[in-house]
Amino acid sequence: MDLTTALAALGVLVLGGIGAQAWWSARRSQPRKAPGLTAGEDSARQDPALGDLPGNGEAAAPLGDEDAALAPVAAHPVLPGSNRLSSLRPAARLDALIDAIVPLTLESAVTGDLAVAHLPASWRAGSKPLYVEGLNVATQVWEQPVHGQSYGEFQAGVQLANRAGALNEIEYSEFVHKIEAFAEAIGAMTDFPDMLEVVARAKELDAFAQPLDAQLSLVLRARSVAWSLGYVQQTAARHGFIPGVLPGRMVLPGAQDGDPPVLVLSFDAQVALADDPQDAALYEVQLSLDVAQTEESAEPFPAWHRAATALAGDMDGWLVDDQGRAVTLHAFDEIGKELQLLYRTLESRDLAAGSPAARRLFS
C-alpha cells in the first residue's frame, strides 16, 4: 500500500469515529423513552384505560385548584367520592372541634325547597368554608338541605382554621352576614357566639395545627439521561400510580373510594402539554406525602419511602431534598420517628390523621 492510499484510509477511519461519537452523544442527550415506544406513540400509551392500571380511577377537581380551600387534600388531586366542594358544599358534618356552630331555631318545620332557595350563594367566608345543615323531620338526620324534604331545625358553622390561617374578625363578620340573611328568609332565630371568643378559639387551634402540618416531599433527579413523559408514566404506573386530573400529576390512590390520594407524583406540566411530549425532557420529578390526609394504619410513610426508592432504582435517579442534599436511609429513619410523635399529638386532640376533622383542618 503506498503512502497516499494509507493516508486516505486513515482519513476515512477518523471521519467514521467522529461520526460515531456525534451519534452517541446525540443519543445520550435524548430523553429516555418507555420500552417499545417511539416519539409518535406516546399519546396512545399515556392514557391507558384506568382498569389496566393498579388502583381506582380519579375524577374530581385536584387539590390546589379553585376549590382547594374547601377540600381536604389539599394540595393535590382527589379521587371519586372525596368531600371536595360540590355545587353546594362538602358532605362533611359540622364538628365542634374545628367549627364555630350557630343554632337556627324554627317555630315550625320548613320545606327543603324554601331552604335551598335561600342558601348562601358562596360557601366561603373569606378563606374559610361555611356550612348549613338541617334536621330532616322524617329521618332525624342532620344533612345538607335538599328539595322535597322537611326540616325542623337548622345549624350553621364556619371553620375556625385551615392552611390559610385562623378565622379572623372580617371572615367571621362575613359568615354572620350570610347566615343572618338565610335565617331571615326561612323565619329562623339565630344565636351567634361572641366574635372575640370565636376568634380566640381560632387562633388557639391554628397555633396547635401549624407545627403539625407535615407535608413531606422528595425530588428524584435523573443521574445522566433525561426521561420522556411516557417513560415516567409507565414506570410510575408499575408502582400503582394513576393519572391525575391536572397535567403533570400522577397519584397513588387511597385504599377506599372517597379517600384522598396517599402520594402525589408531580412533574413539569409544560412537558405534559407539549405538542410532542416524547421530544420534551424531564430531569426531575417530585414525590409528596400529605401526612394529615391518610390514616396512620394505612402506612403512608412506608409507602412514600418504598415508592421513592423503587422509582429511583427503576429510573436511574437519585433522591434529594428541597435543598438538593442527598436523602439517606438515616434521614428516612429520623423522619419516621418524628412522625410517630406527630401522630400521637394529633390523636391527643381527637384529630387523628385521616379523620374527617383532620382532613378539613389541614386543607
Image (cartoon, rainbow, N blue to C red):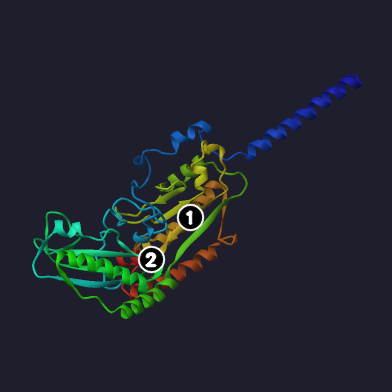
Residue nearer the viewer, 324 or 332: 324
Q: Residue at x 30, y 61 (%)?
A: 123
Q: In which quadrant of the rendered image does the N terminus lie?
A: top right
- 190 left or right, relative to 13: left
Q: Residue at x 46, y 52 (%)?
A: 265
Q: What amino acid type should be assigned to the residue bearing mark 2?
A: Phe
Is the residue 115 above or below the residue 1 in the image?
Answer: below
Give the label on residue 112, or none.
Answer: none
- Considering depth in this image, is 154 or 37 the residue closer to the camera? 154
Whether residue 94 is visible here, answered yes or no, is no
Any part of residue 65 in sight: yes
Residue at image coords 46%, 53%: 307
Viewed as shown, does residue 101 lie left or right of 330? Answer: left
Foreground mark, 1 or 2? 2
The residue drawn where x is 48% and y is 51% is: 266
Q: Residues within 10 Å of mark 2 (few under 14, many from 20)?
A: many
Res 186 → quadrant? bottom left
Secondary structure of the residue carrying numbered label 1: strand
Q: Secondary structure at mark 2?
A: loop
Inspect the image, locate mark 1, and give the three-letter code of the amino acid beneath it: Leu
Residue that numbered label 2 is attached to: 362
x%, y% of residue 325?
Answer: 60, 61
Say which quarter of the image contains residue 119.
bottom left
How many residues crowd around disc 1 within 10 Å: few (fewer than 14), some, or many (20 or more)?
many
**Can you say whether 97 is above or below 262 in the image?**
below
* Image quarter of the C terminus: bottom left
Q: Which mark is residue 287?
A: 1
The answer for how far apart the CA atoms under marks 1 and 2 are is: 19 Å
Front one among 292 and 199: 199
